[in-house]
Image (cartoon, helix red, strand yellow):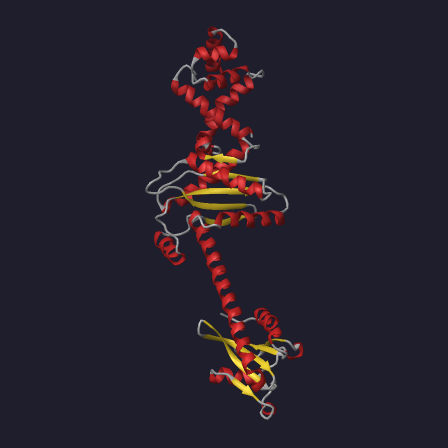
Amino acid sequence: MILDAELAQQIVDKTQGILDANINVMDIQGVIIASGDRQRLGRLHDGAVLALKRQTEVEITQDSDSALRGVKAGINLLLKCHNQTVGVIGVTGDPDEVRQAAALVKMTSEMVVEQASLMDRLQWNKRHKEGFILAWINHELSEDQLGGWAGRLGVSLEEPRVAVLIELGKQNPMLNLTDMQDVIELLEFPSRDNLVAMVSTNQIVVLKPCCSQHQAWSGEREGLRIDALMNRLADKGIDQVKVALGQFFSGAGHMHLSFQSAQQVLATGKLQFPDRHKYLFEELRLPVLLTPLEDSWQGGQLRKSIDTLRDQDPSGRLLKTLQALYEHQGNLTQCAQALHVHRNTLRYRLDKIHDIAGISPHHFTGLVELYLGLQLSVRSAL
């Protein structure tokens, strides 16, 4: 624990009212870093130097103060934190008159130092835990490093977790930051064993416990929990939020896959359903799984048939027919009824699709290939 000027001044401000005397705080070198008398700042205090050297309190009387530099009559007491000397606190006045009050000042000062030390440790733990979470989801740690970090931070790698990505949509970064702090507080308190970290100026990742010995993984159950969270956020006036639930992958070494799936769920959901606020992997499973094909030559080949249909069917009738066929699970009768056409007309259109695209929707494999091409084409258009 290092006693800095800011903390030292807090000590002076909190203890000055205990007695009618000036209070000085000296660092581990004996330099005055805080004082009720601002003119004394930066001076070496011989009484503090003596106390530090002897590791005991030093009283200065009217007779002895002339022999020491930068001192007045008073008492100099060691400030300790976890049994380690971090500085000296000096109370000006006749030692016989201020001795009792000085003891109270010392006790109060050490309480301030202990509290600051605790906050430092909590902040250190929080910063390192966030760093650990980010390294974990980005797959930057070896198995040994993952276990070592988790052990030091008290994180159980045996706890099954799933990644949830929360995005705030306000344009003002400062407003986002304020809301993000509120979101993080809701996620962490009361404790739900959530691991929370900021991944950007408007995104938060949550690695949340998702199953146990008595409860198997359920995307539906996690979706209901997200609804509850969004209701709590709305109660705080935080409504410009989008939440994406990734897929659960067993094993701590696969956490980066859950995070990647949450990223892809969010991106896909925002493209296809921009007005929604909650996106689940199970609801967007196929378009998310097709994401890696978007920029590949394989994806280009799948889109090619749909692009050809679109070019040679300006009215969009054939694509509409194809979409209706998918909506009715390939059932020709139901599809024809939905389109208000004769079954033979429907067969004619499907034959036309085969002629233009070179892929037959009458065959299962052709129907699947056209469906995949249609899905990729929709993503590309968005």
- Rendering coords of residue 26 (x, y %): 56, 77
Q: Is residue 349 above or below residue 97?
A: above
Residue sticking out furthest to the bottom: 63
User: Where is residue 173 shown, x and y percent of the image?
Assistant: 61, 48
Please tell me whether residue 327 is drawn above or below residue 118 in the rendered image.
above
Residue for point 62% across, 50% down = 174
Quadrant showing the C terminus: top right
Q: Is residue 164 visible?
A: yes
Q: Is residue 302 above or below residue 334?
A: below
The quarter of the displayed image where residue 329 is located? top left
Q: Work out whether residue 27 or residue 188 is closer to the camera in this orientation and state it.
A: 188
Query: Which residue occupies the foreground of this view, 193 or 341?
Result: 193
Query: Which image quarter: residue 149?
Result: bottom left
For this rendering, which residue is in front, 173 or 224? 224
Q: How many marks?
A: 0
Q: Position of residue 53 (x, y in %)?
A: 48, 84
Point out residue 249 in the picture as x, y percentages from the top left corner.
38, 40
Q: Nearer the viewer, residue 281 or 59?
A: 59
Residue 27 at least partly seen = no
Residue at horizontal 57 percent and vertical 71 percent from the top: 11
Residue extending farthest left: 213
